[in-house]
Image (cartoon, rainbow, N blue to C red):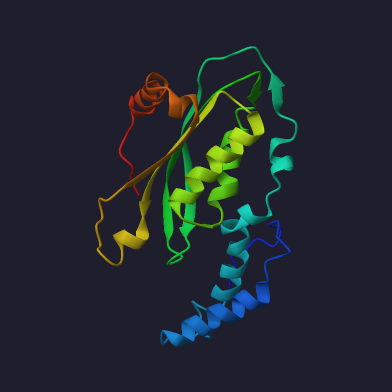
Amino acid sequence: MEFDDVDDRDAEDLRINNPQIEEAIKNILEAIGENPAREGLKLTPRRVARMSHELFGGYSMDSQVIINGALFDVRYDEMVLVRDVDFFSLCEHHMLPFMGRVHVAYIPDGKVLGLSKIPRIVEMYARRLQVQERMTCQIADFLRDLLKPQGVAVVVEAMHLCSMMRGVKKHESRMTTSAMHGAFRANLATRQEFLANISRGSTPLQI
């Protein structure tokens, strides 16, 4: 009995060409000496094509839809911190996953953002072919341009399978990147407060 774990109700990005992806996956399977027609692989090209809509959904996300008016006038000028936002992305060099967490802080200048929007912004940039350095800057720049705050800080901690399962095969290696704007770049005490807050009670990244 055959079964298919692909849910046809999943939303699709119409810019992703399913037949083209399916054909490419069949070619890869043949190129590594596999048989795309065998039972375990018959539906793999279709599954990969459908999965692509989720893995690369960041390309089709509309920032205006994500924010959806969730900008509020609030008289508050202390640090707003959202830490430990999980993410999964794909390295553009080998198309292997890298994953970890993002810590985001900003100091408002009259506007605050709805809490759920920061994880959505992270998702918008993570669900693309990426490099960690670029993703870190994209998140920080987006919040800077959206909120016009006194400052923005983003730190990303991640594990990269391209260095864990191939190449140097360093299983315990971690990569940390940061992007700072405004008060976080200009004021050492502000930056140190942010870094102290995200390190307090943090746990090691694990797969």
In the displayed structure, would residue 51 be above or below residue 135?
below
Near-viewer residue (9 or 138): 138
Identity of the residue drawn at 64% across and 12% down: 75
In the image: residue 188, left or right of residue 68: left
Residue pictured at 48% horizontal, 44% vertical: 136
Residue 9 rendering spot, x and y as whole percentages:
71, 58
Residue 53 screen position, x and y as percent:
63, 60
Residue 35: percent from left, percent from top? 47, 86
- Looking at the image, the residue that sits furthest to the top is 75
Residue 10, given in percent of the width and then of the height, sits at 68, 57
Q: Is residue 52 above or below residue 131?
A: below
Residue drawn at x 59%, y 58% is 56
User: Is 11 or 110 nearer to us in this picture?
Assistant: 110
In the displayed orientation, state which residue is furthest to the front. Answer: 186
100 displayed left or right of 128: left
The answer, for residue 1, to whether it is visible in the render is no
